[in-house]
Amino acid sequence: MRLQNAGPGLLFVVTLLAGCASGPGSIYVPAGGAGGQSRPPAADSGESAAPAPQPEPRVSEPAAPEPAPRYQDESEALSPAARSLIRKADALLRAGDPQGAISQLERAQRISPRSAEVYFHLAQAYAGMQRYGAGEQFARKGLSLAGNDSGLQKQGWRVL
């Protein structure tokens, strides 16, 4: 009689315990692959057998050192589209709109990302907004891309 009243409570307890039961094991394979898995112990038949030879661990060769960054002898040539955007940005700077100039120069930077000239113009535009820290960073980036071109280097040092 008492079991009839315990039906919902008993069902809850059984469900709760079933949820806490652990599964058969992990579904993930160890990183060592099939060779790195341990074998289950053999049934003891009373005879002492010699242990099975274990595979030798794999020794990976050290990775090749990363190549040093290469020095750029010359700045990337400006594409005609980037040159046109720089001209528009110069006109906007002369008109007193440094924010508009920066937007044009950022487009030019996406077109020619390895051109020092774009970075020097960006530095001038940020200096026009009195954001000297950003201007200095762009000038330094331009100098790093100028390579051996003394004309571009002079332009960069003037901006700094």
Image (spheres, rainbow, N blue to C red):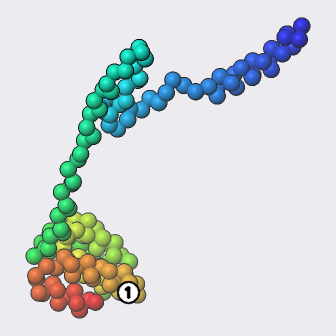
Seen as rendered, the residue at the extreme top is: 1
Q: Is residue 12 above or below residue 92?
A: above
Query: Who is closer to the viewer here, 156 or 124?
Result: 156
Q: Amino acid at mark 1?
A: Tyr
Nearer to us in this view, 16 or 147: 16
Residue nearest the observer in this picture, 105 or 54: 54
Local secondary structure at mark 1 = helix
Is residue 125 among the parts visible in the rendering? Answer: no
Please name the residue shown 87% across and 13% down the image: 5
Q: Residue at x 34, y 21 (%)?
A: 49
- What residue does disc 1 label? 132
Identify the image quadrant of the N terminus.
Answer: top right
Screen quadrant of the C terminus: bottom left
Q: Is residue 5 above or below residue 69?
A: above
Quarter of the rendering containing residue 147: bottom left
Instruction: Estimate how packed mark 1 is, as few (under 14), some (14 to 19) or many (20 or more) residues with alpha carbons within 10 Å.
Output: some
In the orientation shown, which residue stands out farthest toward the right?
Answer: 1
- Residue 94 image offset from top left, x and y in percent: 30, 86
Residue at the farthest front position:
47
Q: State the residue at coordinates (34%, 83%).
A: 135
Q: Is residue 47 left or right of residue 122?
A: right
Residue 107: percent from left, percent from top: 28, 68
Vertical position of residue 56 compared to residue 5: above or below = below
Q: Where does residue 145 sit, x and y in percent of width and height? A: 19, 76
Hey, which quadrant is residue 126 in on the image?
bottom left
- Which image quarter: residue 22? top right
Q: From where the camera sits, is residue 22 visible?
A: yes
What residue is drawn where x is 20% and y is 50%? Answer: 61
